[in-house]
Amino acid sequence: MPSRSKAVKAAYLGLLLALAVVMGYVEYRIPFHLGIPGVKLGLSNIVIVIALYELGALPALLISVLRVGIVALLFGSPVSALYGLAGTGFSLLVMTVLRRTDRFSLIAVSAAGGAAHELGQILTAALLLKSSAVFYYLPVLLIAGELTGALIGFVAALLHRTLKKMEKGKRSERRDQE
């Protein structure tokens, strides 16, 4: 997103947050059963990946934390908020580091973020349950996180390309009007 006023940026952040919450609601109301207990598609992560690539790490973190809080408040519980914050924190950290290297595609960054999300949640489960037995489930969750993260990344990449084309079209339209 090119340099814009603070009001426009705030509106854009609000729009992305609203989209993330709506996608969280859709996922809550219409669960996508992937055959693995506890694994969800993570539709709202499309918005987080777009925010990371369009706005940067801090706005993506803000949207992530607010989304987790709102969705947990509306549809979940304090425990689901803990799991969500741990997952989104690990995920965003990994995606931010990989994004900054410029060595990985958006899809690869998202896939790594999906796996990191699962790792964050399993670490939280181990702490809350005071048991290392949950780590036996980690390989299944990592594979699921990679696959769902790649799918989310694919959709986010399509949207990111579309946003770039729209922005380029608006710039040329403004030049033509001048």
Image: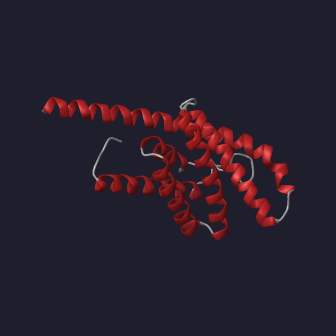
- Residue 166 in sight: yes
Foreground of the two, 53 or 23? 53
Q: Residue 124, image x and y in percent?
A: 73, 60
Foreground of the two, 16 or 96? 96
- Residue 31 in sight: no
- Identity of the residue furthest to the left in this view: 178
Q: Is residue 26 above or below residue 2?
A: below
In the figure, is residue 164 to the left or right of 151?
A: left
Q: Residue at x 28, y 31 (%)?
A: 169
In the figure, is residue 40 to the left or right of 45?
A: right
Q: Quadrant of residue 74?
A: bottom right
Q: In the rendered image, which quarter contains the C terminus? A: top left
What colouring method underlies this structural image? secondary structure
Q: Residue at x 61, y 36 (%)?
A: 150
Q: Residue 145, image x and y in percent?
A: 68, 43
Q: Residue 128, image x and y in percent?
A: 77, 66
Q: In the rendered image, which quarter contains the N terminus? A: top left
Q: Residue at x 53, y 51 (%)?
A: 44
Q: Quadrant of residue 121?
A: bottom right
In the figure, is residue 173 to the left or right of 58?
A: left
Q: Residue at x 55, y 69 (%)?
A: 73
Q: Residue 152, image x and y in percent?
A: 57, 40
Q: How many marks?
A: 0
